[in-house]
Image (cartoon, coloured by chain):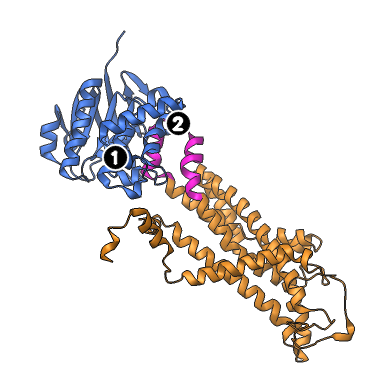
Amino acid sequence: MTSAQHLLADEVTVGYGRQVVLDGVSLRIGRGETVGLRGPSGCGKSTLVRVLALLHRPDRGRVSIDGTAVDAVRYAVPVALRTRVAALFQSPRAAADPRLSLTDLIAEPLRATRTPESAVRDRVDELADLVGLTADLRSRRPHAVSDGQLQRACLARALVHRPDYLLCDEATAMLDASTQAHVAAVIRDYQRTQQAGVLVVTHDQTLLDRWSDRIVDLAAAAGVRA
Amino acid sequence: MADLAARPPLLRVARSRLRLRPGRAGVVVAGLILLMAIAGSLLAPLVWPLDQSAVALGQTRLAPSWTHLAGTDDLGRDVAHRAVYGLRVSLLVGAVAAVVATVLGGVVGGIAGTLGGRVDRILMRIVDTIAAMPHLLLGIFIVAMLRPSLGAVIASVGLTHWLSTARIVRSELLSLRTRPFIDAAISGGAGRLRVLTRHLLPHVLPRLALATTLMIPHAVWHETALSFLGLGLPPHLASLGNMINDGQGSLLTGAWWASLAPGAVIVVVTLAIAVLAARWRDRLDPRVRAELHL
């Protein structure tokens, strides 16, 4: 009855033109587990995150969520599956629509899935409190806040649908130490309370050691069928 | 300057917004000129009616004076009076043609930029092909197929000027499509329609509106060129192109003023629109905008 409780990339191969970026890579993120992913620049960490986030179709191999294989990518993914995986990207600046206030930014995924407006407001307030955005900041637009403040808003947005899996692609690389610690703490709390699976991609070895239950080296994982 | 920080923030913002910056005077002057041009065009039939076919053969080629501010032409018609009506036609043609071109270019560029792939390649090759032909020639061809009228001139200008708009919209959409914030929106569960209407179009629309505005002066010049070649409005109707064309004959007899007023009007008004559009373009850059507001 209960099938596998994990987000799985199964022998995923991705190439851009003639260059193969991922060659038969497998990665499993179990519920309630934090997996650290490391590897040299350009080894395909971000591509793997995009594949797991159902944003990029692998040339070969597939992604499955709790045992359900997902063949669709981008718009074609059913909302029920789509909202179970969320991603947090390296640059909050690039990942935030410059036209939206932080409140609207956090609310956008809820509005996109037709949540009643009263519920949207409650959930946004709850999350903004969680990530520590003051009322003054919430009405501002991305250009008027710092990278750290914006990344907190992006984190709130990623958590808004209560995803089972959270993918953090160098999500703390651009932040100062205290914001980094705060963002990490929020993610860890979320992971514990929701029994979520978290993927942490980073160059920062100390962060990996402190944060993850298991570390996967992408350069080693390629072709090894880890 | 030291006490600036002590002021309430609102006052500081108001102050910084009111301060005259370099270039601001030019924008104000341009705005006033455009305002006068539009008001003049709209109010002229009420305030200063003109009988388009009236001639006064007793007072041909009079030099500028207090009764005829810009002189009279070879048929004794008041040049200043007709220039106002000429501007009216030119602005109408310019604005409508620019809107036609924008809609057409927006739709073609929008389809190419959203669908991409083969559709994009086919549409853009069509655009390239049309762009390879001299557009004045193409415009003349379109007018020749239709009967000379206001509609024909608008069609001629509108149908030959949508290419750059299509390219702008397409490239803007293609570059936006791959931006991480679009990925983030999709990741949040937004469908194709919502991404298009909430995240892509709002970014394209200001640029599109700007493209339209920048196109108006060009369309006005184009209308003038067609009229000057005798392909625009019927000759008795006042349009800036017709007037400059008519003035050619007078020029040879020493009556330089017959072409001067319509020529000056078109240069001043199109320059004013261009100045305002340039200012707007500067403000569109989010970094510039952020500096203005903070």
Q: Is residue B178 magenta?
A: yes
Q: What secondary structure is found at the residue carrying circle 2?
A: helix
- Do the residues marked 2 and 1 share a common chain? yes
Amino acid of disc 2:
Ala
Above/below status of A9 relative to B41: above
Indicate which disc, 2 or 1, sits on the residue closer to the N terminus.
Answer: 1
Q: Residue at x 47, y 38 (%)?
A: B195
| Residue A112 numbered mark, or none | 2
Task: Report the disc number at residue A30.
Answer: none
Element type where label 1 sits in the image? loop
Which color has been applied to chain A in this rendered view? blue
Near mark 2 (Cα within 10 A), the count class, few <14, some 14-19 or many ≥20, is some
Left or right placement of residue B125 versus residue A217 in this view: right
* Residue A89 - label: 1
- On the rendered structure, is B286 left or right of B85? left
Q: Name the mark nearer the viewer: 2 or 1.
A: 2
Q: Are marks 2 and 1 in contact (CB under 8 Å)?
A: no
Which SS type dominates the magenta stretch?
helix
Chain letter for mark 2? A
Magenta stretch: give its range: B177-204
- Amino acid at dot 1: Phe
Q: Could you say where residue B77 lies in the image, as x and y percent from the top left?
A: 82, 79
Mark 2 to mark 1 CA distance (whole Å)? 20 Å
